């Protein structure tokens, strides 16, 4: 695939590892669901599929979000920031659960002045998500 | 200051450069305004001031957002994600302008299937912002 990368991918300022940070935001609520990374192939696949495909830095491979959990993200809009080095996706979140902990959003820990506390409910037991 | 870093800063998983990615989201609209980075001191200063202080990777110094433009960000909430390596701020954006291009949000370029196009208006001429 790298032999035929579309030209619009060149507009993105990929970092020294060939990655770009990606924010996934829920269509409608505008909730920030998660943060991940993409390489060129992940972004090209995302456009092709119409679903979010990230680059897993820990597993070092493409990660079609929801491939195990079923919690796919249908992509409605792709934005690029002023410096062309951050991507924002507007997505429809399957199951309304983006986080591997079974919560709506990954950003469920709130700072109260002294420490961090989980303030969002677990909607589905992770053991039932990844069975 | 580094001699007396508060304990809650240790919960954050700082990267190999001592940084964490930060998403700034507008209180109310939930619009994603910008993306930047913080080091430990920037996050501590943010909490102290109640206004967003980032770490400028290009200038290699603390950057009190709005120090030149006046477009400060009053911080209402600080969130941490499930992996404890990304921060989300809920902010009140002074002037409703977060971007150095004079736009509301830095994410003003939209992908249309072939390329990226600016789809958000310039609210204030950058030459009038940075005078």
Image (cartoon, coloured by chain):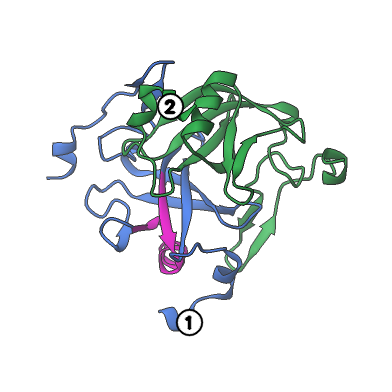
Chain colours: A green, B blue
Image coordinates for residue B60, horizontal then vertical, percent: 29, 62
Q: Is residue B40 magenta?
A: yes
B15 sits left or right of B45 in the view: right
Identify the residue position indicated by label 2 in the image: A3
Residue drawn at x 57%, y 65% as measured from the top left: A113
Position of B89 relative to B109 (above/below) = below
Residue drawn at x 32%, y 37% as measured from the top left: B97
| Residue A31 visible in the current orientation | no
State which quadrant residue B3 falls in.
bottom left
Image coordinates for residue A105, horizontal then vertical, percent: 66, 41
Identify the residue position indicated by label 1 in the image: B4
Viewer-proximal residue among B29 and B32? B32
Residue drawn at x 59%, y 24% as measured from the top left: A28
Which residues make up the magenta segment? B35-56
Q: Give the structural element (helix, strand or loop) at label 1.
A: helix
Q: Within 10 Å of the Cα at label 1, are there few (<14), some (14-19), or many (20+) other Cα atoms? A: few
């Amino acid at each position: 695939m790298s032999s035929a990368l579309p030209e619009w991918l060149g507009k993105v300022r990929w970092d020294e590892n060939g990655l770009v940070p990606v924010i996934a935001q829920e269509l409608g609520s505008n909730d920030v669901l998660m943060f991940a990374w993409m390489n060129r192939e992940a972004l090209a696949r995302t456009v092709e599929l119409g679903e979010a495909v990230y680059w897993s830095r820990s597993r070092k491979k493409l990660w079609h979000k929801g491939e195990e959990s079923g919690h796919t993200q249908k992509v409605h809009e792709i934005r690029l920031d002023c410096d062309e080095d951050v991507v924002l996706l507007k997505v429809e979140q399957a199951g309304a659960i983006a986080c591997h902990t079974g919560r709506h959003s990954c950003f469920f820990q709130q700072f109260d002045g002294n420490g961090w506390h989980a303030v969002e409910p677990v909607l589905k037991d992770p053991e039932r998500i990844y069975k």
